């Protein structure tokens, strides 16, 4: 019976290793952006967690940690998320890839002057 226990122990170790290296379940982006800010001047924070709420809390914390005082949650995502802005408009996007999220954020911003400020994925 000892080989069975070794097999079981090996399987348990493999499962534990897979769980410990698994990617986060969700991501979020918080932003401190006001009308008139150039996209390069926008403050932001990115957070990841096992849930969208946990990711949102981390994003707000990261945004404030960088000295931004008016941080607001702008996008929660599973996969990839992005925030694009111009001096007067902003847009958010999400998708399976960072390129898809960025494209959607620029489209949602709706102006040719919109630039991607931040984007990331939860893996």
Image (cartoon, grey):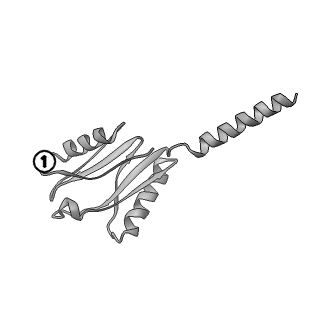
Tell whether 123 sits left or right of 93: right
Tell whether 17 sits left or right of 66: right
**Residue drawn where x is 60% and y is 46% of the image:** 20
Q: How many marks?
A: 1
Tell whether 70 sits left or right of 103: right
**Residue drawn where x is 32% and y is 42% of the image:** 98
- Say which of 47 and 53 sits in front: 47
Q: Position of residue 105 (x, y in %)?
A: 25, 45
Quick one: quadrant of the C terminus? top left
| In this view, 29 is above or below 105 | below
Secondary structure of residue under mark 1: loop
Q: Which residue occupies the extreme right position in the image?
A: 1
- Say which of 112 and 88 sits in front: 112
Q: Position of residue 16 (x, y in %)?
A: 66, 42
Q: Which residue occupies the extreme left position in the image?
A: 112
Q: Position of residue 23 (x, y in %)?
A: 50, 44
| In this view, 110 is above or below 117 | above
| In this view, 58 is above or below 95 | below
Q: Position of residue 73 (x, y in %)?
A: 36, 56
Residue holding disc 1: 111
**Label 1 neighbourhood size at 10 Å, few (<14), some (14-19), many (20+)?**
some
**Residue drawn where x is 37% and y is 43% of the image:** 80
**Residue drawn where x is 41% and y is 63% of the image:** 62
Quick one: quadrant of the N terminus? top right
Quarter of the figure with residue 63: bottom left
């Amino acid at each position: 019976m000892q080989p069975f226990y070794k097999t079981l122990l090996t399987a348990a170790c493999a499962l534990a290793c897979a769980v410990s290296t698994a990617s986060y379940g969700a991501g979020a982006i918080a932003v401190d952006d006001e009308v008139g800010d150039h996209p390069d001047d926008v403050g932001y924070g990115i957070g990841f967690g096992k849930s969208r709420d946990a990711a949102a809390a981390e994003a707000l914390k990261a945004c404030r940690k960088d000295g931004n005082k008016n941080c607001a949650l702008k996008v929660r995502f599973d996969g990839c998320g992005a925030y694009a802005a111009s001096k007067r408009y902003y847009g958010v996007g999400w998708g399976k890839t960072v390129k898809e999220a960025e494209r959607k954020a620029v489209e949602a911003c709706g102006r040719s002057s919109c630039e991607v400020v931040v984007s990331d994925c939860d893996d």
